[in-house]
Amino acid sequence: MSLPVECGVNRVLLHTTTTAGDIGLSVCANGLKPAYLNLKSNSVDIAKYLPQLTLPGKLERGETPSEPSYNDTKTSVEILSAKAGSNSENISNSYDDNELSEWKSDGKRENAWVEYRFARKEKVSELTMKLTGWRNKCYPLQVFAGKKLVWEGITDATLGYCHISLDKPVTTDRLTLRMVGPVQDSSKFGDMKELAGGNAGEFDRIKAANGKVELRIVEIDILKTYTK
């Protein structure tokens, strides 16, 4: 057999037979002295090294169930329409189920809000959001059901979506998010890296100007308690 040598290196993968014994490998090339390697293979207890060959099949659990093995606890509220204090033409990017698009306000505090309207009155209990710069940016927000303030605080830096749970579910046909101050920096995940290296995506790289109040939403999901 002829094997090519790449950068002075070659590799040989050896598969033994079922019979133990001596193995000889010789290598010859024009202009070089031949080289020889002698190996010895030993017999092994195959059941010890390859237990899958002797394990019996277990079929007591039967076939895969036709119904889900989990119970839904939350379900999404249908968003009928939305409007914003700025860049309203792109507001659908915040709930289009596409994490490669985003909506952002114009950087002015008075315009950093968005209102979502539902097809009907819903009993809202939670919001999940992917906010641009999610790994190192925290957004000071207020959430209103109609004109009633139902949540206020600063979102956590996350590896994806942040969750805002309302203290009490609120029945409403619209929900408003308002950013009330500049975004805050976080070093919570400063030492953690993505498996592929670098940032997770384009929207994870943002740099906010000091004092700028720019609300940026990659995706939002408004939830209610699931009922059959």
Image (tube, rainbow, N blue to C red):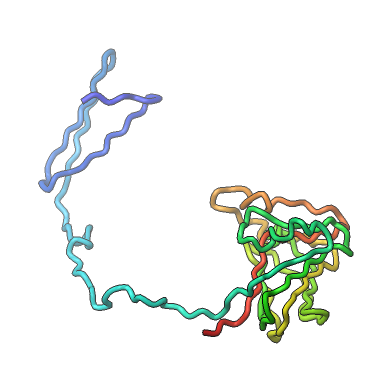
User: x, y (%) of residue 40?
Assistant: 17, 41
- Nearest the viewer among 54 and 64 is 64
Q: Residue furthest top?
A: 31
- Nearest the viewer among 4 and 176 is 176
Looking at the image, which residue is at 77% across and 79% down? 145
Q: Quadrant of residue 41?
A: top left
- Nearest the viewer among 61 and 174 is 174
Tell me if I can see residue 163 in this picture: no
Q: Is residue 56 above or below residue 211?
A: below
Q: Quadrant of residue 62?
A: bottom left
User: x, y (%) of residue 131?
Assistant: 70, 62
Looking at the image, which residue is at 28% across and 77% down? 61
Looking at the image, which residue is at 16% across and 58% down? 45
User: x, y (%) of residue 118?
Assistant: 69, 74
Q: Is residue 68 above or below residue 16?
A: below
Tell me if I can see residue 38 in this picture: yes
User: x, y (%) of residue 228?
Assistant: 52, 84
Q: Residue furthest left?
A: 19
Quarter the N terminus occupies:
top left
- Nearest the viewer among 96 and 196 is 96
Left or right for 220, reference 141? left
Q: Is residue 42 above or below residue 225?
A: above
Left or right for 97, reference 40? right
Looking at the image, which residue is at 75% across and 59% down? 216
Q: Is residue 8 above or below residue 216?
A: above
Left or right for 126, reference 177? left
Q: How many marks?
A: 0
Q: Quadrant of residue 130?
A: bottom right
